[in-house]
Amino acid sequence: MKEEYFKWYSPHLHRDVEMLVFGHAGFPVILFPTSKGSFHENRDMGLIGSAHWFIEQGLIQIFCPESNDAQSFYHKGIHPHQRIQNHVAYDKMICHEVVERIRLNTPVSKVAMAGCSFGGYHAANFAFRHPAMSVICSV
């Protein structure tokens, strides 16, 4: 199974961001990690392995970005307003840096959103905030 690692500077988050991509073709799925999880969490916990057949057949391609939870919802040392601003910056990063990159490389106009636990929250939140970009919300 093809696995690619990406790291880039995010102008929305003002820091480097990491992401793993699994597969060579297929419908794009953004798979968020759980609370404060790492970009490699879904691979390490076996979730990517459970979708191996679908990935190998070129039916789906899974994108696993890192979370921003430690700088937003779980950062108790800053004011709640700043936590939400940090979350909005993460949302913009997903929208303008991850989804746009996916859309440039695939003929599909929409992207599936998925995640477990707090990743499910991110999937639902993104899908409801950006219905023109996302099609599936898996919680």
Image (tube, rainbow, N blue to C red):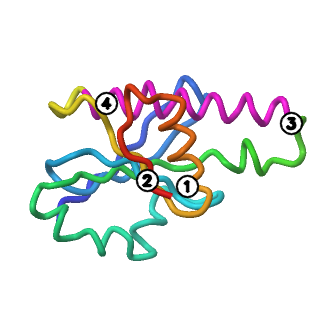
x and y percentages locating residue 54 in the rendered image = 18, 64
Tell me, yes or no, whether the two marked residues, 1 and 2, touch with CB atoms within 8 Å.
yes
Residue underneath mark 1: 119
Q: Classify mark 2: residues with Cα within 10 Å, few (<14), some (14-19) or many (20+).
A: many
Front-most of residues 10 and 114: 114
Amino acid type at mark 4: Arg
x and y percentages locating residue 128 in the rendered image = 52, 35
**Residue lying furthest left in this view?**
57
Tell me, yes or no, whether the two marked residues, 4 and 2, touch with CB atoms within 8 Å.
no
Residue underneath mark 4: 101
Image height of 122 relative to 94, above or below: below
In the displayed structure image, the side of residue 53 where residue 32 appears, left or right: right
Would residue 61 be counted in the magenta stretch? no
Q: Which residues are magenta?
A: 80-103
x and y percentages locating residue 77 in the rendered image = 90, 45
The quarter of the rendered structure image containing the N terminus is bottom left
* SS category of the residue bearing label 4: helix
Q: Classify mark 1: residues with Cα within 10 Å, few (<14), some (14-19) or many (20+).
A: many
Tell me, yes or no, whether the two marked residues, 4 and 3, touch with CB atoms within 8 Å.
no
